[in-house]
Image (tube, rainbow, N blue to C red):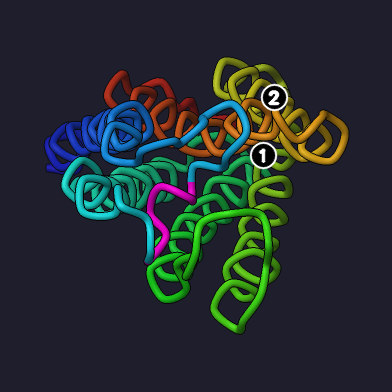
Amino acid sequence: MKEDYLKKLRFCGIFGIINFLSYLAGVLFAPLAYPGYDWMSQAVSDLSADTAPSLMLWKQLTALYGSTGLVSVMAVCIYVSVTKAGNKIFRAGIYLFAIMNWISSIGYEMFPLSKAGKEIKGFQNIMHVYVITAAVVVTSIVSLILIIVGGFRKTKNIETAIWAAIALAMMFIGAIGTGAVPKQYFGIVERFSVFAAVGFDMILGIQLLRGAYKTQE
């Protein structure tokens, strides 16, 4: 009975792939509705700002983004909890990454950018950039470190740990790069950070589909 339940649960991993593809569609095609948008210098969040001409297209293209990611990551949480996959450190990292997804989904929905651009003014924009983004970045980094440490322990879940290390490296490139590169290249390095989290969501979903989480304890 338990095995049948877990087998069905694993299919929820496909939502992680759908989540990534929906987000990718928004990033690639929403600029078509934003005259003058420069992906090399502008942030992805500019596409979904309240005053952005691309807002409607962004919402249509990313309609499956967020909710599908939550379904996938919560299925992963249930799976590793029931099977006792990895060790306590590894599982804690998975749970914290799920919390990050909830913070991101709810926080950015509550406080979208009111205006595209790098000038941060007003309560809504301050919450978006300095509170929600900061919370997402901190929980992302800590969760990935926990997954890396727990995953490499006894090498049972080393594959997931390697992907977590790649995602963490991308986040650091984005975080450091946005303050180090010239303004005309801000958008390039910023995308390292945003795709790190969404991409790792997809990896967790794929690992769930494959039943790749291994018990260590």
Which residue is labeled 2 in the image? 165
Seen as rendered, the residue at the extreme right is: 180
Instruction: Look at the image and say whether residue 46 sits in the magenta stretch.
Output: yes
Indicate the secondary structure of the residue bearing disc 2.
helix
- The amino acid type, in three-letter code, at marker 2 is Ala
Residue 20 versus residue 42: which sits nearer the camera? 42
Q: Quadrant of residue 210?
A: top left
Where does label 1 land, which residue?
144
Give the image quarter of residue 157: top right
Which residue appears farthest toward the front when viewing the image? 36
Depth check, front residue: 145 or 54:
54
Q: In this image, 139 relative to 107: left or right?
A: right
85 falls in the magenta region: no
Q: Residues within 10 Å of mark 1 (few under 14, many from 20)?
A: many
Residue at the spot 75% in from the left edge and 35% down from the top edge: 183
**Residue 153: x %, y % from top left:** 73, 26
Residue 142 shown left or right of residue 47 in the figure: right
| Gap in angstroms between the C-alphas marked 2 and 1 | 7 Å
Direction bottom: furthest residue: 123
The stretch in magenta equals: 45-50
- At 67% across and 67% down in the image, what residue appears? 120
